[in-house]
Structure formats: C-alpha cells, structure tokens
Image (tube, helix red, strand yellow):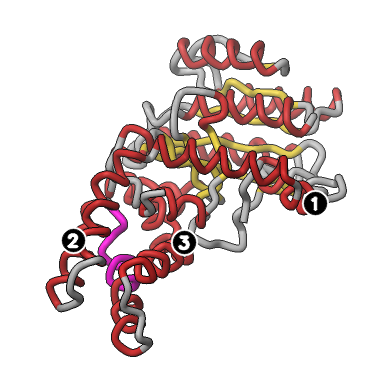
Amino acid sequence: MPRDWADLFITDEPDGSAGESQSGEGKERRRGLLRRLRENLSKTRQALGSEIQATLFSKLDEHTWERLEEALIMADVGASTTASVVEALETEATEGGLTSGEALSERLIELLADTARNENDRIDIRAKPTVILVVGVNGTGKTTTIGKLAWHLRNELGVSVLLGAADTFRAAATEQLEGWAQRAGCEIVTGPEGSDPGSVAFEAVTQARSKEIDVVIVDTAGRLHTQDDLMGELAKVRRVIARQLEGAPHETLLTVDATTGQNGLRQAQMFADSAGVSGIVLTKLDGTARGGIALAIARELGLPVKLVGIGEQLEDLRPFDPDDFARALIAER
C-alpha cells in the first residue's frame, strides 16, 4: 500500500523504496508523516476516537456495539461499511476471546484499514507521456491538487510534467494553475477564456509528445454530476485525448471534498459511472469530523483512494495509506 510518493507511482525505475523503508531515516520519516496525519485528522479523531475508546474500554454488551455503530456512522464511515466492521469485531470478541479494550481497538483499526484496501491503488506513469485527467465539482480543491501533484512529481521523482489548463470557463482557474506551474517548474498549455477545453487538452498532449514530457496533467471545469452539458463536454475531452494517444487518459482522478460527507459519496458514484474515474483524491480532511468517508468510498464504490489532502502545505497532499489512516482516526497515540 502506498505510503510515500515513490510507493504510489509505478515507474520504469528500479524500486528502491523497500530498502529505504527499512533504514532508520526512512522509518523516522514515516513516523513524522503519521504524526502530521494524526494532527490534521484531529477533528475526526476527537469525535470518533474518544467515543470508541470510551465504548471499547467499558462493558461489552449490546449497547456497546450500538454505540460503536453510531460513532462510526457519525464519522461517515457509511452504514454498510459500519455494519460489516462492527459485526466482524463483535464476532471476534464473543467467539475469539478478544475482550480487552486495547486489543479491540487494535483489531478495529485493522478492520477499518482492510475496508479501504484496493489492489489498484497505484498510478502507472510508464506510458510516455502519461495523461492524468483530473475532474470534480467546483470548490473541491481540484486545481490546487493538480499543482501539488505536479510539484511532487517534479521534485521528489524527477519527472517532467506539463499542465493542461482545460478549465476555460473560469479565468481564475487558469491563473491559479499558471502560478502552480511556475512554482513546480513545469510547462503549461492554456487557452483563451471560454475556448474549447478539448482543444487545450489536444494541444497539451501534442506538446508533451513533441517535447518528450513524462506526465501531462489536465485540469477540467468544475461541474456537478447533474449538469448534462458539462458532463458531455468532459466526455468530449476524454475522446479527444483518447484519439490522440492510445490508452489515454491513463488515469482519471476525482477530487472529493471530505466535508460534504455522504454527498461526496454520491458524487463519486455519479462520476464513476460517467467519467471513467480510476481513483479518488479526498481533500479537506483537516476541516471535517467526517474523515470516515474515505473508508465508505473505498468499500462501497470499490474505488481506490489514492491521495488525501489534509492541509494547505505542499506536504499535506499525501499518498493514501489505509493502515496509517485508520490508526490516525482511532488511536490516541
């Protein structure tokens, strides 16, 4: 499961991440990342963790399991996911002799992490160029996510990146993306306000091919899944890219605002059905007590959460790791 940027991406380079993870420096870095994740998920942990700790360290009876279910549902883990996790934990507690509060908490963390595991949780960037299409509703942090992703690809993996500003409806989106391109040290293709987004995407891929750029990240106009004309336009952008480069777009990432809770789950479902979504970027986790939505999306939709946004800083866009995430939600330390 991805824990660092080198783990998230499939490249042509030999995988040296395993050795680093065993080194003292690698272990200390991971501990630091977990600490930061815990800090930025404090709202969810305060709402969820305190209730769970009180529940699992008290008498185990029917009321215990009901309180646990309520706590998980309030954190937007989702009814189906919650029922499955609580049933498994109750069974192990009654049949397997798992009774201590600490042991139950550890097993709950494991069960929650298991709900979010997905074998397709990595991003393959071996195609030259690899085209990553980013979609989502306005206000979910789409453009910022693209900028941070470009920065990490350039500065941590040494990959050349070109941005395609195909959100031509909102002038501020292009200006914001231009700022990120400058910050990340990558090129950008733009078009006049109101111009055809498909033409911008086409030109971005054309330039990437001619300049032998490794990765193209294409921004798109924020849209609701109920806006048929905009969803149709998004389909057109995909067709333009596909006609120009076989297998493209190679990755379609959907940004989902965690603060919207179950609405985010419904958005993800609609986009998955119409936009060929291959992975989720869950943003604004630091501003919500509904962090469990990451688990609901992963289990109920079968879509891998690949990245999470937990703050404003560059390092606050992180590859999603289900074990670290579940521990940050529950554990007091």
Labelled disc at residue 19: 1
Residue 22 x/y as whole percent: 74, 52
Occupied quadrant, residue 140: top left
Task: Name the mark nearer the viewer: 1 or 2.
Answer: 1
Q: Is residue 77 left or right of residue 156?
A: left
What stretch of residues is rendered in magenta? 76-85
What's the CA distance linking mark 3 and mark 1?
24 Å
Name the amino acid type tagged 2: Glu
Q: Is 119 situated above or below 29?
A: below
Secondary structure at numbered mark 2: helix
Residue at figure coordinates x 32%, y 32% from the top left: 287
Closer to the chain start, of discs 3 and 1, is 1
What's the CA distance linking mark 2 and mark 3?
19 Å
Task: Name the mark nearer the viewer: 3 or 1.
Answer: 1
Report if residue 229 is visible in the image.
no
Residue at figure coordinates x 46%, y 38% from the top left: 255
Q: Residues within 10 Å of mark 1 (few under 14, many from 20)?
A: few
Residue 61 x/y as whole percent: 16, 78
**Which residue does the numbered mark 3 point to in the structure image?**
113
Residue 80 painted magenta? yes
Dominant SS in magenta: helix
**Which residue does the numbered mark 2 point to in the structure image?**
70
Q: Residues within 10 Å of mark 3 (few under 14, many from 20)?
A: some
